[in-house]
Image: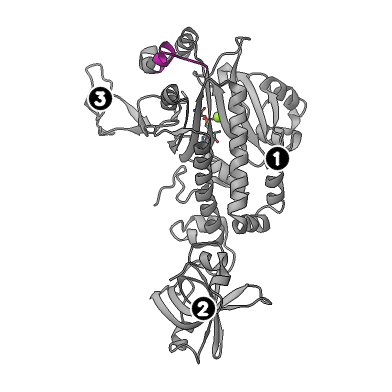
């Protein structure tokens, strides 16, 4: 048995040879004594055309009744067809049904809406769009590992269950063995977490950053790549409750080096996917975004823009009337503001840096002005925020003061503060939302369509 990708990659080796392929029927039609079916085996995006004839196979009538979606194994001659749409086809000697498909198979040849396909998440990997998206997802994940590996980074595994809220936004999913309706109580009426599995309240992680910082203080350059959970009640096209995040952390580095790393990583992944997934990218270019390939290709060699938050606010204030949300120094940038900057003003990826400390997390390094922190967000057209990162506060007293200022307990972060007591150094890192990267690469506009089994508010039927 040979995979369809192997045939397309090296057709000359199989020319006029007998081959056996297995796959699923994408289309099938026949007239009198001649029939055609297109097979896909998942090894590549392309389909393989099979020609079956009554005078050549012994079950012609039966094969004409196969439904789309059936699993079959075909043996036959590979014949070059230079003047046809497909470069070659298989003239079948035998067609064996491996698994029948009912005639109510939902993925018929017509185009289906993304909403409908979302309702059949168990079958949609076989639809063209999702075949392309999920392969790009796989290739992009590999590209990220390859990028960091080539640069000597250590891949760090950080815990999914954690006792700290890295982002301080209180958007955590609680993990508990206590009976939620009837928990054991302390004398003062509060929940008695000493009886909980870990003896204290724990949650699913919103970020592996704090643990990645620990690893970076040993290995110098590390990255994480893992599931991340946020109980954000925002029902948007860019937020999922479960998503994957890549978080590099680099010692002896400042914000400028952090931005350089972010830019290099994005370019590397774009270039790798463009090279490895030409068929999938052509499909997105045809059906989702006509200028996609050209734009992404140009990006690989282009500069990214850079403005400070203060400059960004000045720009946005001149276009106030365009926005639903108010713009003023100190406001958190909304997605409409981010997209305006990257889509209308700069028309390319843009770094926004040096945000007011009030709207950013406790660990970001305070700038000399005492008002802003060494933060950076990378905004890209069509998405808005793709990456969020910062230089970290390495000064023990400043960090401790900030923790207290935010009403947090330094005791809870004693291990994190220890990093500043034992060889603490300047360091920086960022988080890339993997799904947003896939949306950016493919032009798919809803995060629910780049996750095989999306977890968003009110949906977990799988
Ligand atoms: O900006 P965020 O919240 O930053 C952090 O978590 C830092 N600890 C990262 C770091 O410095 N190590 O999240 C980082 C990125 C965002 O830019 C966005 O792309 C993505 O994670 N993200 C989400 N993606 C999908 N669904 C959500 N609910 C997301 N929340 C954040
Ligand atoms: Mg952010």
Q: Tag 3, which secondary structure?
A: loop
Q: Nearer the viewer, mark 3 or mark 1?
A: 1
Q: Is residue 55 visible?
A: yes
Q: Which residues are magenta?
A: 416-426
Residue at image point 52% right, 64% down: 5
Query: Which mark is first along the chain, 2 or 3?
Result: 2
- Across and down, in percent, residue 344 comes to 75, 36
Which residue is labeled 3 in the image? 199
Q: Quadrant of the N terminus?
A: bottom left
Q: Tag 1, which secondary structure?
A: loop
Tell me, yes or no, whether the two marked residues, 3 and 2, touch with CB atoms within 8 Å. Answer: no
Residue 301, numbered circle = 1
- Nearest the viewer among 188 and 305 is 305
Query: Which mark is first along the chain, 1 or 3?
Result: 3
Residue 220 higher or lower than 21, as above or below: above
- Across and down, in percent, residue 408 comes to 42, 15
- Nearest the viewer among 47 and 333 is 47
Residue 17, numbered circle = 2
Residue 312 higher or lower than 275, as above or below: above
Residue 5 higher or lower than 434, as above or below: below
Q: Nearer the viewer, mark 1 or mark 2?
A: 2
Residue 131 higher or lower than 20, as above or below: above
């Amino acid at each position: 048995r040979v995979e369809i990708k192997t045939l397309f990659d090296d057709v000359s080796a199989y020319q006029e040879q007998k081959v056996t392929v297995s796959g699923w029927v994408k289309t099938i039609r026949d007239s009198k004594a001649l029939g055609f079916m297109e097979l896909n085996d998942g090894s590549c995006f392309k389909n393989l055309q099979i020609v079956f004839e009554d005078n050549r196979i012994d079950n012609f009538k039966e094969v004409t009744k196969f439904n789309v979606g059936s699993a079959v194994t075909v043996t036959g001659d590979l014949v070059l067809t230079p003047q046809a749409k497909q470069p070659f086809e298989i003239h079948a000697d035998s067609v064996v049904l491996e698994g029948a498909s009912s005639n109510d198979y939902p993925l018929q040849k017509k185009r289906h809406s993304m909403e409908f396909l979302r309702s059949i998440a168990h079958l949609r990997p076989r639809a063209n769009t999702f075949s392309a998206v999920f392969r790009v997802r796989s290739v992009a994940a590999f590209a990220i590992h390859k990028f960091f590996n080539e640069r000597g980074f250590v891949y760090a595994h950080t815990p999914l269950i954690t006792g700290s809220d890295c982002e301080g936004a209180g958007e955590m999913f609680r993990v508990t063995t206590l009976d939620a309706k009837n928990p054991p109580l302390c004398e003062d009426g509060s929940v008695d977490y000493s009886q909980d599995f870990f003896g204290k309240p724990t949650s699913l992680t919103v970020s592996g950053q704090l643990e990645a910082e620990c690893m970076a203080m040993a290995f110098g350059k590390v990255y994480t790549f893992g599931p991340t959970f946020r109980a954000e009640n925002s029902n948007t096209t860019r937020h999922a409750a479960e998503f994957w995040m890549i978080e590099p952390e680099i010692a002896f580095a400042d914000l400028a080096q952090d931005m350089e790393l972010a830019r290099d990583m994005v370019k590397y992944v774009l270039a790798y996917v463009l090279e490895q997934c030409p068929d999938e990218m052509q499909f997105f270019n045809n059906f989702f975004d006509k200028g996609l390939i050209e734009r992404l290709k140009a990006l690989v060699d282009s500069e990214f823009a850079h403005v400070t938050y203060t400059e960004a606010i000045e720009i946005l204030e001149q276009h106030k009337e365009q926005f639903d949300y108010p713009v003023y120094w100190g406001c958190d940038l909304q997605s409409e503001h981010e997209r305006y900057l990257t889509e209308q003003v700069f028309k390319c990826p843009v770094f926004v840096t040096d945000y007011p400390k009030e709207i950013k997390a406790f660990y970001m390094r305070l700038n000399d002005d005492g008002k802003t922190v060494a933060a950076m967000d990378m905004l890209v057209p069509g998405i808005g925020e793709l990456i969020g990162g910062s230089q970290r506060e390495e000064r023990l007293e400043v960090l401790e003061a900030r923790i207290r200022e935010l009403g947090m307990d330094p005791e809870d972060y004693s291990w994190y503060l220890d990093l500043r007591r034992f060889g603490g150094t300047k360091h920086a890192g960022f988080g890339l939302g993997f799904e947003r990267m896939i949306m950016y690469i493919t032009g798919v506009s809803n995060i629910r369509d780049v996750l095989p089994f999306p977890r968003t508010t009110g949906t977990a039927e799988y």
